[in-house]
Amino acid sequence: MSGSRSSSPNSNSTWSLKENKMFEEALAYYGEGTPNLWDKVSSAMGGIKSAEEVRCHYEDLVDDVKMIESGRVAYPKYKTQGFWTQG
């Protein structure tokens, strides 16, 4: 899959793997509680996503985690290689 589509009714944007990585790095840099967080994350991404798209994407991810943790959605099965799969 080359990207993900936000499930929020407020956002129909598609996110590429590169955009997701930029989002994660900007969010890790600024952290929750930062004033104007969504504007700063959007700017750190070069403005390719609006502050509203960034906020909706974050809320969708939080909702996904809640669904997984509540047992309503199975944990994703990732293909793994390398150190952790070596016997």
Image (cartoon, rainbow, N blue to C red):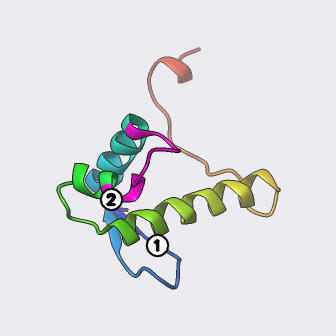
Q: Quadrant of residue 25?
A: top left
Q: Residue at x 82, y 56 (%)?
A: 70
- Out of 73 and 57, give the one closest to the viewer: 57
* Residue with the most extreme top position: 87
- Image quadrant for the C terminus? top right
* Residue with the most extreme right position: 71
Find residue 21 and report its horizontal and vertical position in percent: 33, 46
Instruction: State the SS at label 1.
Output: loop
Disc 1 residue type (three-letter):
Ser
Magenta stretch, overall SS: loop
Q: Is residue 81 above or below residue 30?
A: above
Disc 2 residue type (three-letter):
Asp
Find residue 57 and report its horizontal and vertical position in percent: 46, 64
| Residue marked by disc 2 | 39
Q: Is 33 within the magenta?
A: yes
| Residue marked by disc 1 | 6
Q: Is residue 54 above or below residue 8?
A: above
Write the start and end of the magenta stretch as one range.
Answer: 30-39
